Image (spheres, helix red, strand yellow):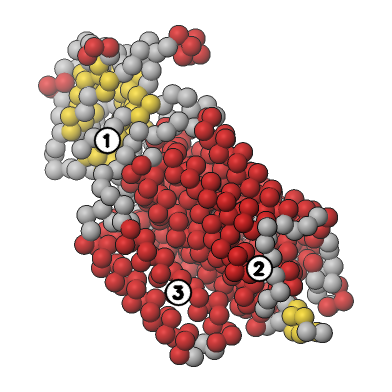
Amino acid sequence: MPQPTTSTRRTGGVVPVLAFAGIVVAVMQTLLVPVIKDLPELLDTSPSNATWVMTATLLAGAVSTPIMGRLGDLAGKRRMLITSLAIMVVGSLICGFTDQLLVMIAGRVLQGFAMGAIPLGIGLMRDMLPAEKLGSAMALMSSSIGVGGGLALPVAALVAQHADWHALFFGAAGLGVLSIVLTLAVVPESPLRARGSFDVAGALGLTLGLVLLLLPITKGSDWGWGSGTTLGLFGAAIVVFLAWGFMELRLKAPLVDLRTTARREVLLTNLASIMVGVAFYAISLVLPQLLQLPSATGYGLGQSMVVAGLCVAPLGLTMMFTAPVYARLSARFGPKVTLILGMLIIAIGYGAGLGLMSAAWQTVVISVVIGAGIGLAYSSLPALIIGAVDPSETGAANGLNTLMRSIGTSVSSAVIGMVLANTATHAGGVAIPTMHGFRLSFLIATGAVVVGVLLALFLPGRRKPVVQLRASSEEDAVLARTEETLAAFRGRVLGAEGAPVARARVTLIDRRGRQAGAALTDAEGRYALSVPAQGPYVLAAKAPGHAPRAAAATHHGEDRTVQLDLALEAASASEEAARG
C-alpha cells in the first residue's frame, strides 16, 4: 500500500546538520580513549572493571539503535533523533559530576543512546533528499562516526592533559545541545510512518541477551573461561536469544523483522558490519596506548597525550574524505564492490601495522590506510541495507545494521581489552600493555575483516535495471495514452483542487537510490512506469509552478499494477524565485 507522501523542500541544510549529529555521537563514543590507560586510577577500580566505562556505552548504543530506529519509523525520525541527543546530554552531565564507578557507568549508558542518531539520520535523508544527492549524503552520515572520532581524539587529549578530565563530559553535553538546536531549526519531520506498535518485550529481550553475551566476554579472564559463571552466562545468552527470536517471529510488529533480516543481502551485510565494527575499534584502543607508553619499555613511543591524539586523528579525517570517493565508486561499480574494497584496504592496513609500530609517523600511515578502508566500508552499508528493504522500514533496518556495527565495536572493546590485560606485564603494581598484546590485537582485527570479505563475496551482484518505459528527455518524452502501456505503476499527477498537471516529470527511484525510469504526464495528468523487478520504490513528481513531491510504494510482482496518484502543491513565491 502506498505510503504517505513527503516533500523534498527545505533540505538545503539537512545533510550538514545530520552529519554534525553523527559527529557528536562519535565524539561521545571516543571521548575517553585518550585517558583509557588512566581510568583504573581515576575511578579507583581494577582495569577489568574500568573496561566497562567504555563497554557500557557501546552496549547501550547496540541496544538503543534498533529501538530508536523502530520508534522513529512509528512516531517520527526527527522526534526520536532529538530524544536520543537529549538522553546523551543528561548522561554527559551525570558523568561530569562523579568519580564513582557505578554512577559513571550509568551516565555512560545514557550517553550510548545517542547511537540511535545514525540510523535516524540516514532514514531522514532517505525520506527527504532527491536520488542524485542520496548516495553521497548517506556515505557522509555513515562515516561521520569515524570523522568525529578522529577529530575528537586530539581535542579530548588536549583537554584531558591541561584540564580536569570531567571537562570532556561537559564539552560533550554542549555539543549535544548545539546539535539539538540545529536539528530543531533546520531538519523537518518526515511524514513517512510505519504501521504497528512498539515491541517492548522484544526490546527487553534484546537488552538482556546482549548483556548476558558481553558480560562473560569482558570478565571471562577474571572468572576463568571454563568457570561455571562464564559458561552459564554464555549458555543463558544463547537461550535468551533463541527465545527472543521465536517471539519476534510470532509478532505482527516485531522490534526486529527477522524474516527481512534473513534475506541474503540483509543478513550478509549485517554480519559483515560486525566485522567492520571489530576492525574500527581495535585501532582506536591500540594506537593511543602504544604512542603514550614510555620509550623505556623498549617499544613504547613516549609521546604526549596530545601528540598521540594527533597521530590517530587521520583515521577520522581520511574517512571524511572517502565519502565523495565512495559515491563515485558506488555509482560505477555498486556498494558491494566498495564494501569489499574497503575491507581489503583495512586488512592491508592492519597487516602492515604488524611491522610498523616503531615510530610515530608509522602510526599515522596506519591510521590513514585503515581510515580509508573503514570509510569505504561504512559508507557502503546503508546503501546495501536500503536496497533490500521497504522505505517504511528504513529506520528500523538501518538501526539493526548500526546494532551490528555496535555489537562489533562492543565485542572489540571487550576482547581487545581482555587481550591487552592478559598479556600485560606488571611493574610496581601497574599493568603495562606489551607489544605482543598489540600485535595480537591487530591480528584479531585482520582476521575479522578477512571473514567480512568472505561474507561480502556472497552478496548479490549489482543489478542493471531493464526499464521498458523511460523518458528520453524532459522536454520531448510526453507519455502516450496510458491505456496502451503495460505499466507496473500508473496514476495521475494532480494540482490544486484536483486539476490534472500536464507535462509533469515523474521519476522512478529504485531501492538503491538510482533512477529506474521516468516519464512525462499527458494532458490528463496521467503517467505510467514499468519496473525492472519487484520491491520498494520511490516515485518523485515535479512540475513548473509546483513544489516537488515524492511517495514511497512497493511493487509485489505477479504482473500487478499499482495505482498511485501524486498531489502537487503550488510553489510559494520564494521557492519559485529560488528555482528561477
Q: Which residue: 69% across, 65% down?
A: 99
Cα gap from disc 1 to disc 3, whole angstroms = 38 Å
- For label 2, the residue is 100
The percent position of residue 204, horizontal first and vertical second, equals: 37, 64
Give left or right: position of 86 versus 475.
Answer: right
SS type, badge 1: loop
Return the mark for residue 61.
Answer: none
Between residue 131 and residue 98, name the one nearer to us: 98
Circle number at residue 213: 3
Q: Quadrant of the N terminus?
A: top left
Relative to 481, does residue 407 appear above or below in the rendering? below
Mark 2 vs 1, N-terminal side: 1
> Secondary structure under badge 2?
loop
The answer to which quarter of the image holds residue 301 is bottom right
Dot 3 alpha-carbon crowd within 10 angstroms: few under 14, some 14 to 19, many 20 or more: many
Residue to which mark 1 is pinned: 3
Whether residue 95 is visible to the viewer of this picture, yes or no, is yes
Q: Can see residue 154?
A: no
Looking at the image, tell me whether mark 3 or mark 2 is earlier in sequence order: 2
Q: Position of residue 519 (x, y in %)?
A: 29, 22
Q: Dots 3 and 2: beta carbons under 8 Å? A: no
Residue 505 in the image: state x and y as whole percent.
Answer: 32, 19
Give me the C-alpha separation between circle 2 and circle 1: 49 Å
Q: CA distance from mark 3 to mark 2?
A: 25 Å
Circle 1 crowding by C-alpha within 10 Å: few under 14, some 14–19, many from 20 = some
Q: For the point 52% across and 50% down, which residue is it?
A: 87
The furthest residue to the right: 296
Asked where in the image residue 128 lies, by quadrant, the reply is top left
Q: Residue at x 55, y 39 (%)?
A: 180
